[in-house]
Image (cartoon, helix red, strand yellow):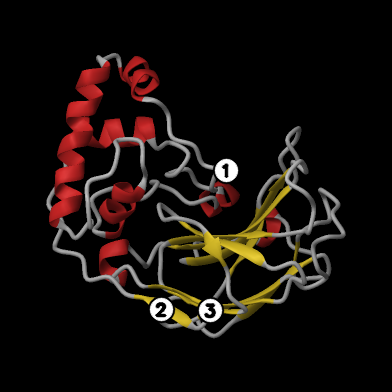
Amino acid sequence: MASALDCQGDGQRWVLVAAHDGVRSCIPIGLPVQVGQTVLVGREGDIPLGVEIEDRGVSRVAAAVTATEQGWQVEIRNRNGAMLHPWGQPPTLAGRHNSLVWPRIAFRVLTGADGTDPRRHWVLLESDMIAPTTAGARIAAGSGTSTYQPARPTPMSDGQLAALRAVFADHLRWPPASPAEARTLAAAGRRLGITESGVQDRLDRAIKRALRLGLPRAFGSTNPEYLYVLVRAGYVPLPEHGLHRLLLE
């Protein structure tokens, strides 16, 4: 069984799990992995999931994760499937076989429970070796592949980044929030100490950048579609530290 004590060294690839039930959250546990190494996650996996916060809806082996030269191969074996949550990108239903290149990747293991069940079980993949721009923003799930060719990013202003983070805090959270909901411009303005129109002005500038990067049309300021484009192009920095840093302290 993995524990924080198992997580020694400063490996650059980590497989972790986290869970919460609306009242309590488990301390994340995980293992550093090397290229070619496979880790099983589930109720009877190398890293247990669905045990501390008990849930028999999680399969004995819910996922098999292999570190590859460039990213990850993830086989979803969970009988109820899983949702794929790349950091800063929209969630999608995971395929059986997933080939992924992204710095922070989460899978929410589905248990077959109805929408009122507060339990959430996460498989989290972290790599300090991958950045969205160097990865080419390649996120491939199942048999389909989405490939992006972002333009070389130029810095956004601190004010624009602050506005994005205030409105889309849930979408930029790590581990992910599920569901992720945008703040209103008024709430973001109160958080930043500026007017609602000031938030709108900053976001309008961000939307214009996303349009130049290939956003097909202008979306509303609280619609995350333009945020996803900006993240893929490297305009929004990653969270400074992954969860594995907590285990090394």
Question: Quick check: 231 left or right of 49?
Answer: left
> Against 24, is 85 above or below?
below
Residue 60 in view of the camera: yes
Residue contact at pointers 2 and 1, CB within 8 angstroms: no
| Disc 2 packing (10 Å; few <14; some 14–19; many ≥20) | few
Horizontal and vertical percent for residue 225?
34, 50
**Which residue appears at 44% of the width and 44% of the height?**
171
Which residue is the site of mark 2?
145
**Which residue appears at 15% of the width and 64% of the height?**
151
**Which residue appears at 31% of the width and 62% of the height?**
132
| Disc 1 packing (10 Å; few <14; some 14–19; many ≥20) | few
> Against 43, is 205 above or below?
above
Where residue 139 sits, quadrant-wise, is: bottom left
Query: Under tag 3, what secondary structure?
Result: loop
Q: How far, Cα to Cα, is label 1 from label 3?
A: 22 Å
Which residue is the site of mark 3?
142
Identify residue type, mark 3: Gly
Where residue 190 sits, quadrant-wise, is: top left
The circle drawn on residue 179 is: 1
**Which residue appears at 76% of the width and 32% of the height?**
23
Identify residue type, mark 1: Pro
Horizontal and vertical percent for residue 229?
28, 55
> Against 163, is 206 above or below?
below
Q: How far, Cα to Cα, is label 2 from label 3?
A: 8 Å
**Quadrant the N terminus occupies:** bottom right
Identify residue type, mark 2: Thr
Horizontal and vertical percent for residue 76?
66, 74
Camera-side residue: 216 or 150?
216
